Amino acid sequence: MFNFQKKIAVKAPRIDSKRKRELLLFQDQVGLDFINLDLLNLAFCHRSYVNESSEDIENNEKLEFLGDSVLGLITSEYLYLHLKDKAEGDMARIKSFVVSEASLSKIAKAIRIDNFILIGKGEEYSGGRSKKAILADCMEALIGAYYLDSGFKPVQEFVLSYLVPEIMNVLENKHEQDYKTLLQEFVQKTYKTCPKYKLVKKTGPDHDKTFLVEVVIKDEVFGPGEGKNKKTAEQHAAHIAYENYMKRQAE
């Protein structure tokens, strides 16, 4: 059995008295109680901070990898136990919404993760603390860190306290729509084919790029959708195409 009381050695940034007060404040605000503050500090450590640091430290990406799996298990178990009337496909769609970048970044913002992230100066200047991808990744890293620190039950309680309201939003259709999924389902059903996404253009410096993406369905082109990463730009292109099809159907 894994011993969660044993301190796990990690290459986290050094915790001085100021940083310790910040970490304790975060715990107090959110209701967490880490045995190993180094794990919590590492969960907040973005790769841009590591790249600019002279310390021999790691970033939070491996914790994010672990947290993604822990989050998936907790969500899947809850849906299986509490939504017995739903088909597997319905549960998969609900899960995709509640563990999405949009959902996780919203939760991260709500618990003020943006105030505690360690990021590099370049990322700071480009608004990194507000980027959905960074916030969502840090949320997953926090979940992974808390699992390693305290075990499954504590992290399950923490995750469900924020995820259950998101699940309710999906069931009541109050969530942020995943237009790529909606478009794919519509196009497959209607035209027996799949949308194809094409990167049209990238603009801006490396630390602050804007992506323009078009979506092609049969011989028709929609967009471009715009975003700070390809994923967001594809969602916007899918939104344009989906709304166009819905409007045609209503005419």
Image: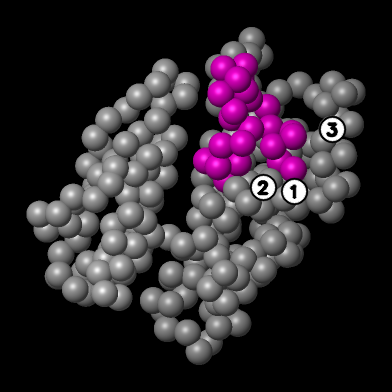
Q: Which is the main secondary structure of the residues drawn in magenta?
A: helix
- Spatial CA span between label 1 and label 2: 5 Å
* Image position, residue 243 (x, y; %): 34, 62
Instruction: Give the total number of marks visible in the rendering.
Output: 3
Instruction: Report helix, strand or loop for mark 3.
Output: helix
Residues at discs 3 and 2 in contact (Cβ within 8 Å): no
Q: Is residue 186 magenta?
A: no
Which mark is nearer the camera, 3 or 1?
1
Q: Is 246 placed left or right of 156 in the picture?
A: left
Residue in view at x 59 percent, y 52 percent: 104
Along the line of sight, the residue nearer the viewer: 120 or 206 = 206
* Amino acid type shown at disc 3: Glu
Q: From the image, which quarter does the N terminus lie in?
A: bottom right
* Image position, residue 232 (x, y; %): 42, 44
Q: Residue beneath label 2, please?
A: 108
* Amino acid type shown at disc 1: Ile
Residue in view at x 74 percent, y 43 percent: 112
Span of residues in magenta = 112-136
Q: From the image, which quarter does the C terminus lie in?
A: bottom left
Mark nearer the N terminus (3 vs 2): 3
* Number of residues whose C-alpha sits closer than 10 Å to that of mark 2, classed few (under 14), some (14–19) or many (20 or more): many
Q: Residue 121 sits in which quadrant? A: top right
Residues at discs 3 and 1 in contact (Cβ within 8 Å): no
Residue in view at x 25 percent, y 69 percent: 248
- Spatial CA span between label 3 and label 1: 13 Å
Could you tell me if residue 134 is visible in this image? no
Mark carried by residue 111: 1
Mark carried by residue 22: 3
Along the line of sight, the residue nearer the viewer: 91 or 4 = 91
